[in-house]
Image (tube, rainbow, N blue to C red):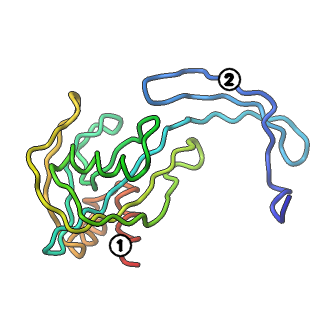
Amino acid sequence: MGADSHLREAEVESESVFKGVMLDVRRDQVRLPDGKISVREYIRHPGAVVILAQLPNGNLLFERQFRYPLRQVFLELPAGKIDPGETLLDTAQRELLEETGHQAEAWEHLGTMHPCIGYSDERIEIFLARGLRSVGAQALDHNEFLDVLQLSPAAAREAIFAGEITDAKTITALYWLTR
């Protein structure tokens, strides 16, 4: 079982306490490493992608978008949920086109992040898109409203330190860009 077997928990029972359009809230009973029983509540999420969309001038495409849970506008990279049956690359290409009206010639998968490991199984796949070209207007979902802008990677880093970018997927993706 490996060197970390003394840390593992085992599912005893699992139940869905709420199933929405995107999220499934679960309450599981688990057996702890010491044999005792405990409860774990968490959210199942279909996963998402985030895109470092690099323009020929080196700048990156960003979005300003209102996020209801925190009731404020955030500055973030283009991103979106993985639809059932969709490949990761297909999701990234679709989201970039829908949200920004751009396509890319070259795509590279950089890595994976888990934004909320204490209460969600969500994973976000990080992509770098190069050779961008505008192919028309945005094709936003009916409930999606956002502005597209561009920032240099240096300006984006400064926006993080100034508290203007606080979104974890954006900060993590920008860290991968420095690789």
Describe the element under mark 2 as helix, strand or loop.
strand
Q: Residue at x 86, y 48 (%)?
A: 33
Badge 2: residue crowd in 10 Å (few <14, some 14–19, many ≥20) = few
Q: Nearer the viewer, residue 8 or 50?
A: 50
Q: Residue at x 17, y 68 (%)?
A: 55
Q: Which of 111 and 107 is in front in this view?
A: 107
Query: Which residue position is annotated with label 1?
Result: 177
Q: Left or right: where does residue 60 sit relative to residue 88?
A: left
- Of pointers 2 and 1, the one earlier in the residue sequence: 2
Image spot of residue 80 (x, y percent): 34, 44
The tally of labels here is 2
Q: Nearer the viewer, residue 10 or 132?
A: 132
Q: Which residue is drawn at 30% across and 34% down?
A: 68
Q: Which mark is residue 15?
A: 2
Q: Which residue is drawn at 36% across and 54% down?
A: 50
Q: In which quarter of the image is the C terminus?
A: bottom left
Q: In which quarter of the image is the N terminus?
A: bottom right
Calculate the distance from the C-alpha at mark 2 to the C-alpha at mark 1: 39 Å
Q: In which quarter of the image is residue 109?
A: bottom left
Q: What residue type is labelled 1?
A: Leu
